[in-house]
Amino acid sequence: MAFTRGQTQVLYQFLPGAVFEHDQYGFCRISGVELQEKQVNQDAIFSALADLLFQWPDDVFRPGFPDPRAQNNRRLYVIGTPTTVRFQPFPTLLECRKCRRVHRLRDLTRRPNIQPRQCPECAGILGQLRYVQAHNCGRMEELYYPQNACPRHASRFLTFLDTGRVRSARWRCGACGDAEVGRLRMTPCTCQYSRSLGTQQGSMYERGLKTLALTDSALFLPHVVPFINFNEEQEKVFYQDPDTYNLILARTWGVLTEDLPTTIRERAKRLGTGSDASEDEDRADDLARALEAVDPNNPLVLKWKQSKARKAVVPGQEAIERVRALLGARAPAPNSPTPRQLVEHLAILDTLRTTSIDEAAADLTSIGDGPGADHLRSAREFALHDLGIGELKIVSDFPIALCAVGYTRITRDPARSILTPFETSDSAGRVPLYIVSSETEGIYFQLDPSRAVRWLIENRWVQSPVPDSKESAWAWFYTHVPGLFENRWQPNFNEHLAVALRTLLHTMSHVLLRHVEWSGFNQNSVGEYLIPGALAGILYANRYAETKIGGLTTLFEHQLRVWLDDSAQSGRQCVYDPFCTDEGGTCVGCLHREYNCPQFNRELSRAVLYGGPTPPPELGGALGMQTIECGFWHGLHPTLQNA
């Protein structure tokens, strides 16, 4: 029987290793998914893949994944959209709904004249026993079938007592007065994860397979990461100048006001590094020089000299020199590799359709909606002065894509699981990466760098003078917090200032997402994409259909101040307070998200926004201090205001 599902559904529920309930065949396990190869932005997808993989502590906890940082290894992956799904019945232990006897499917298929799904003993309807065993390493097996448990009747009258609890569930023999003949086995696993546990408390439980219901979500936990699927041809422009890194810094810091692609193309013309200098221009220069020799004051000669003088000023050069002056010896040298996240940030600002608050307010004014324009301007002032958000934009054509990388069982936590690649059907044995791409809407936000520096200094994370300008604040981050621009496998990534700023950005994103219902979306329908090196993030509609609802655009244009104010005031609350606050201010009752958090709900704490105790090390705390005295939104906290 054929069935169809949306591609996004396939990504989360119907990839190899998953178990699902079929309308006709009952519970089945996905044995393979064919894909149709698709061209995507290679740097983007492999950067996102590497970031995910290196959240696992060691190579042995992510076996089967070639290191995507190496260019040669990328050919070992196959990328495409899911098409055909193959599946088979699972589990194959069948229970009679009438006499309660349990049979193995393979035993029934050997017996002649057995009707499908019919008990051979009483002709009752057979249904699957709805339990399996799974382990943190990705292993999944059916329950152990005690074929010879009863010395008199073997398995002929075997039944299963399902009490709803693993400890009290029993195998029984119906012919022996329902006498117990066995319990559920705690099957040990000798995988690499089990060997890594040592003798720590609770390790024995972690070594054994857990018995789970087939409907338990922990049975199959796909790991899906977002990446921005930029047009590769447009992105190539960013790498055509030897001073791209300095130009990107200048543009990010507001030193360069012209969009970067235009600046780079103009620089190519002026510096002669492109192919745009035409023979016609050379001939015009020759004619002008000949005329100058005859009539130096000819108006055409003077006009030609003015034009040449303007062309002598190379676009962006002043901005480059300003960056070099701010950074001194730390300024990037020509042809230095630019961090991927900074390239993506500039691609968002300079190649996508974005609308700022001022532009949206002007549009509302032009159609006579003065109150709406005033609401937007009020939101801008509140965002900057109360929340420390220096920039807000709506992005109309955000090219987001999702990539399903692999799966874990029991838990998503990289410290307690092994990431398993999907089974491949590729003839060359390449590791499959299943993707779904779309162009959707999003809200871009960027923290005020001056406010962020002051926050670090006020909390005594660092001793330093406060920078006197916005561009000096950006330069301060580049100099003092190199881990903010690095990937997780680089040496400064876990430096405490970088952790503090990433926690601030990530926490603010989750607080804003808690109240995104003003847009008409629930929070699980909106994803987040963070760019720490630019103190920026995008909250995007997690839709992969042809149409756009426009909910985030409506939120931005008509409910922005309400959304921001509601988020800020309610963000300090948790249903598990005061316990949650005392333990660092991060749990399922406040900041944790069930879906769409690429960081597995790490680097989160309400303390960074409102002050208070930070998470202890055993709960993932790495902020370098036990209590934050001054929250980033401390102006909203009466006790801190009066302190």
Image (cartoon, rainbow, N blue to C red):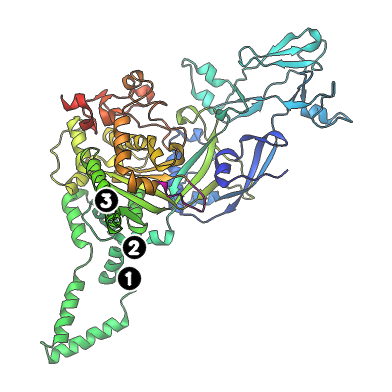
Position of 113 with respect to 582 (left or right) is: right
Residue drawn where x is 61% and y is 36% of the image: 17
> Which labelled disc corresponds to residue 373?
3
- Of labels 3 and 2, the one closer to you: 3
Between discs 1 and 3, the one toward the N terminus: 1
Q: Amino acid at mark 1?
A: Gly
Residue 177 lies in quadrant: top right
Secondary structure under the numbered disc 2 in the rendered image:
loop
Task: Name the spot of residue 371 as percent of width and height, x first.
Answer: 26, 49
Q: Amino acid at mark 2?
A: Gln
Q: Amino acid at mark 3?
A: Ala
For label 2, the residue is 240
Is residue 549 shown in magenta?
yes
Residue drawn where x is 58% and y is 48% of the image: 430
Task: Name the spot of residue 237 as percent of width and height, x first.
Answer: 36, 62
Task: Name the spot of residue 360 as percent of width and height, x first.
Answer: 30, 53
The alpha-carbon separation of the residues under discs 3 and 2 comes to 40 Å
The alpha-carbon separation of the residues under discs 2 and 1 comes to 9 Å
Task: Name the spot of residue 22 as percent of width and height, x first.
Answer: 68, 36
How packed is label 3: few (under 14 Cα within 10 Å), some, or many (20 or more)?
many
Residue drawn where x is 38% and y is 20% of the image: 576
Specify the quadrant that holds the N terminus.
Answer: top right
Whether residue 499 is visible? no
For label 1, the residue is 274
Q: Nearer the viewer, residue 364 or 425?
A: 364
